[in-house]
């Protein structure tokens, strides 16, 4: 069953009923001002940091689901009937029709009731710290209509954590100011004088409200605000309690007439040494923002801003465009997967329907992996991101697991000790170098832990990343796992002194000797990449050292990490093996099967192919590949959080979608295009659109998790949008299955296609040149024709920037 459809032409997902199984969301903003918006206008906005600079309020995990947002009310002043065109927050008021179009960084929601049609376009213009709502109201009746329009938002008192917990304080701090029809939210202005919000309207106001209680009426909800019911705002000024913003506009519409009303919500910051707002002044000086507000309240400006936004996305998505025999592939690669990659770049794991914006900062390992999916679209920003991440690295090569986007400092709450973290930096940097060829990047001076004076070349950071692993090898010569590796919930150094007590935290218990085969595989991959990089820098001695280290670790994996038919997962604190036929549960895990093969382990001696067969036999389901089998049926303190999940969910045998592409890639490495593509299709959200009632999450983006076969809700997705799943699926399909793969020396074309395909077409931007690629035949690459000239093998050397290169890839 579907709840909408793709409009491929417009690059929109069109939702045609409001009661989707879960809120289906989209993102506003491309740079510093951001928001989420659901298909019923739920969501909130923030400036840069969803925790510290949150403009509007949203209550997570609410009932009804997804309440709080950018709501507009329409009131028929002749009858007193009122409703919200976005369905929420007035779901009792039936709509005659409804449509939500989620596009790239904009959303349009519209509906009709009783002959009045209203549609709102929401977006945040490029380069501004504001959002516009363009409401169009049309009278489709035969008679004229007297209407009222009310806007509404609830202001968050900036720090979302405090806002949601510290009521003894924040019921008294809220302050607003209303001037010339603009509502200014200036809580925190007394002490900081450096930021405020504004909410403006293009039309003369009939009134306004800024105190929630006055607008809603005592003990009433957003479904029936008293001001709307009465058809009159109360001109309330908030003193403490819950500041809101609501404008009241009256419209008189002749039959067939359309009126446009624009609302602008924005964030403003004062320069430090502000001459307008000197310390001590409590009144905002509005002269700075007034012209900006006026500009964005103009219809032509709003239309232009919208077109600029569309052009921005045209350009970004022009980085890679494919035409294959499979529509779901084309749609995801050309539009939605690429879009999701950019969203993970902007949000990391901060804000979604599942991430509250206060829980998690920018992840060290997360961001390095996200980069794999967006570096070809925004190489400059990827470069900056890598420098930010590397600057949080510690001198011993270790990493803070997360950093705060506003301060760019390592986050002490979560700390370090995730022993895979440092290695991902090598993969992130390698991806950047392969895409851009910009090797001077390695000489950028980057500090450790942001300490001034500690700067060393970025290359030195990579060295220390490898050394971090080598300095921490366990009894079998495998890398120590620390608090956890990629699998945050495999906490093998965790134990309790009191039997029966739940595991303490995921502390790296001192002397913990648990080892990870996954990190071993990742190390082999990273060491080989660094060897190439060292070679290209002319550091031949080092190149050999890294190759030898990779070889040695490979050998260790074969010796202590191989279980007979698959790679083992780990050794715990007590030296017991995990992910082995010896175990009663958790016998085989997906992660080492993927990562060891990615590192090239077992490719020569058949172990890789054997491991992948085991994955197919034991882990694959129609909804994707589960993380491990058998699921843990009970809690096991010696394994930590993993067994705290009920069977089939999350790390306890859920289909953790992030890991599936590793298997897809591994399958291409052993030449199995059919299996690789089959796995790809099982997860492809567009291909799952038909089963939306089972999948439940958005059919246009990947979710982190789909419930595994042990779960009663097998096939149900959760945690959509912010996951490494996006980047890795993109890499798997574009670089390994379609085989268009940037490499240090140029662009490779090495497809491993499913049988039955006779080739495909693609356009790829690479280092400033455009490659028009046409792949013909089936089998593996035989030779290329580059502008008509035969090239043996799969590598196209970089062409001059600005040039257009015709490439034919002949498979045989
Ligand atoms: C989840 C992980 C997640 C971690 C983040 C765990 O509970 O299962 O998937 O990465 O929390 O803190
Ligand atoms: C989500 C985290 O963001 C990611 O880093 C981790 O690897 C997975 N959970 C698996 O635990």
Image (cartoon, rainbow, N blue to C red):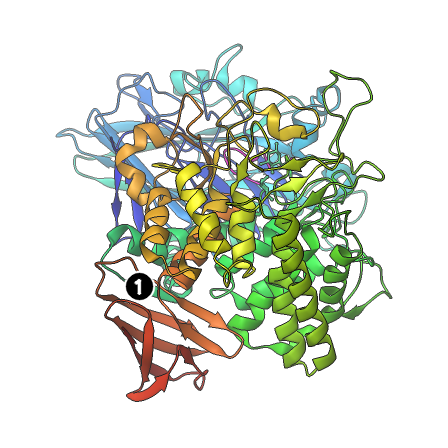
Which corner quadrant of the figure contains ligand 2?
Answer: top right
Considering the image in quadrants, where does the C terminus appear?
bottom left
* Residue located at (17% from left, 33% from top): 140
Q: Is residue 727 above or below residue 209?
A: below
Q: Residue furthest bottom?
A: 789
In this view of the protein, which residue sits in the foreground, 528 or 425?
Answer: 528
Q: Is residue 171 above or below residue 281?
A: above
Image check: 77 left or right of 29?
Answer: left
Q: Disc 1 designates what residue?
A: 322
In this view of the protein, which residue sits in the foreground, 405 or 146?
Answer: 405
Q: Residues within 10 Å of mark 1 (few under 14, many from 20)?
A: many
In percent of width and height, residue 488 lies at: 64, 38
Q: Magenta stretch?
A: 350-359
Q: Is residue 357 magenta?
A: yes
In percent of width and height, residue 244 lies at: 55, 28
In this view of the protein, which residue sits in the foreground, 8 or 627?
Answer: 627
Occupied quadrant, residue 439: bottom right
Question: Label 1's element?
Answer: strand
* Residue located at (34% from left, 20% from top): 91
Residue 680 visible, this angle? yes
């Amino acid at each position: 069953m579907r709840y909408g459809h793709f409009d491929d032409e417009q690059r929109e997902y069109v939702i045609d009923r409001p009661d989707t199984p879960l809120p289906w969301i989209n993102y506003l903003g491309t740079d510093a001002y951001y928001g989420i918006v659901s298909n019923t206008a739920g969501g909130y906005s923030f400036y840069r940091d969803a925790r510290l600079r949150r403009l509007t309020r949203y209550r997570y995990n609410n009932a009804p689901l997804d309440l709080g947002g950018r709501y507009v009310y329409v009131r028929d002043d002749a009858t007193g009937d009122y409703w919200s065109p976005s369905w929420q927050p007035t779901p009792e008021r039936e709509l005659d029709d409804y449509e939500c179009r989620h596009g790239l960084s904009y959303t349009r929601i519209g509906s009709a009731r009783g002959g009045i049609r209203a549609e709102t376009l929401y977006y945040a213009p490029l380069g501004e710290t504001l959002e516009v709502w363009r409401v169009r109201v049309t009278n489709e009746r035969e008679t004229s209509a007297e209407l009222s329009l009310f806007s509404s938002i609830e202001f968050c008192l900036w720090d979302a954590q405090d806002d949601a917990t510290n009521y003894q304080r924040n019921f008294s701090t809220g302050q607003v100011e209303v001037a010339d029809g603009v509502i200014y939210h200036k809580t925190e202005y007394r002490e900081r004088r450096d930021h405020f919000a504004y909410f403006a309207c293009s039309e003369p106001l009939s009134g306004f409200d800024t105190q929630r209680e006055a607008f809603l009426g005592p003990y009433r909800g957003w479904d029936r605000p008293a001001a709307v019911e009465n058809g009159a705002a109360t001109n309330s000024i908030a003193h403490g309690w819950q500041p809101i913003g609501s404008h009241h506009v009256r419209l008189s519409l002749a039959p067939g007439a359309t009126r446009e009303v624009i609302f602008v919500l924005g964030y403003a910051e004062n320069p430090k040494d502000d001459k307008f707002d000197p310390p001590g002044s409590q009144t905002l000086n509005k002269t700075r923002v007034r012209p900006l507000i006026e500009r964005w309240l103009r219809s032509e400006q709003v239309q232009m801003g919208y077109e600029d936004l569309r052009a921005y996305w045209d350009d970004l998505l022009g980085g890679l465009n494919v035409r294959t025999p499979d529509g779901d592939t084309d749609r995801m690669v050309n539009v939605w997967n690429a879009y999701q990659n950019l969203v993970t770049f902007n949000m990391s794991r901060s804000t979604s329907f599942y991430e509250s914006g206060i829980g998690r900062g920018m992840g060290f390992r997360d961001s390095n992996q996200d980069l794999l999916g967006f570096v070809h679209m925004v190489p400059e920003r990827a470069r900056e991101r890598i420098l930010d991440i590397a600057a949080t690295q510690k001198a011993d090569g270790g990493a803070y697991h997360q950093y705060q986007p506003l301060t760019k400092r390592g986050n002490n709450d979560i700390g370090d000790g995730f022993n895979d973290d440092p290695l991902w930096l090598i993969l992130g940097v390698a991806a950047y170098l392969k895409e851009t060829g910009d090797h001077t990047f390695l000489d950028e001076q980057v500090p450790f832990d942001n300490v001034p004076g500690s700067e060393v070349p970025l290359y030195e950071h990579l060295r220390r990343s490898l050394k971090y692993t080598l300095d921490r090898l366990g009894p079998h010569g495998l890398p120590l796992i620390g608090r956890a590796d990629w699998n945050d919930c495999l906490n093998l150094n965790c134990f309790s002194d009191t039997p029966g007590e739940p595991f303490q935290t995921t502390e790296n218990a001192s002397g913990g000797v648990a080892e990870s085969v996954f990190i071993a595989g990742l190390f082999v991959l990273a060491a080989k990449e660094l060897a190439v990089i060292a070679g290209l820098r002319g550091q031949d001695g080092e190149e050999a050292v890294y190759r030898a280290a990779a070889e040695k670790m490979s050998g260790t994996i074969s010796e202590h990490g191989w279980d007979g038919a698959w790679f083992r997962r780990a050794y715990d604190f007590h030296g017991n093996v995990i992910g082995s036929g010896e175990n009663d549960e958790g016998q085989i895990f997906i992660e080492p099967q993927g990562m060891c093969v990615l590192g090239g382990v077992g490719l020569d001696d058949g172990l890789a192919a054997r491991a992948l067969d085991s994955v197919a036999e034991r882990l694959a389901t129609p909804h994707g590949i589960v993380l491990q089998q058998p699921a843990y049926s009970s809690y096991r303190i010696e394994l930590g959080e993993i067994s705290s999940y009920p069977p089939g969910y999350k790390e306890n045998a859920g289909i953790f979608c992030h890991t599936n592409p590793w298997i897809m890639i591994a399958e291409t490495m052993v030449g199995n295009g059919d299996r690789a593509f089959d796995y790809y299709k099982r997860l492809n959200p567009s291909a799952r659109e038909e089963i939306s009632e089972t999948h439940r999450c958005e059919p246009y983006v990947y979710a982190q998790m789909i419930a595994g076969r042990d779960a009663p809700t097998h096939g149900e997705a959760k945690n959509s949008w912010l996951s490494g799943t996006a980047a890795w699926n993109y890499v798997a399909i574009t670089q390994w299955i379609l085989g268009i793969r940037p490499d240090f020396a140029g662009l490779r074309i090495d497809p491993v296609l499913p049988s039955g395909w006779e080739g495909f077409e693609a356009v790829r931007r690479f280092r400033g040149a455009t490659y028009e690629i046409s792949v013909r035949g089936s089998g593996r690459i035989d030779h290329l024709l580059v502008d008509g000239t035969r090239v043996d093998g799969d590598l196209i050397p970089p062409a001059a920037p600005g040039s257009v290169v015709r490439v034919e890839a002949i498979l045989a």
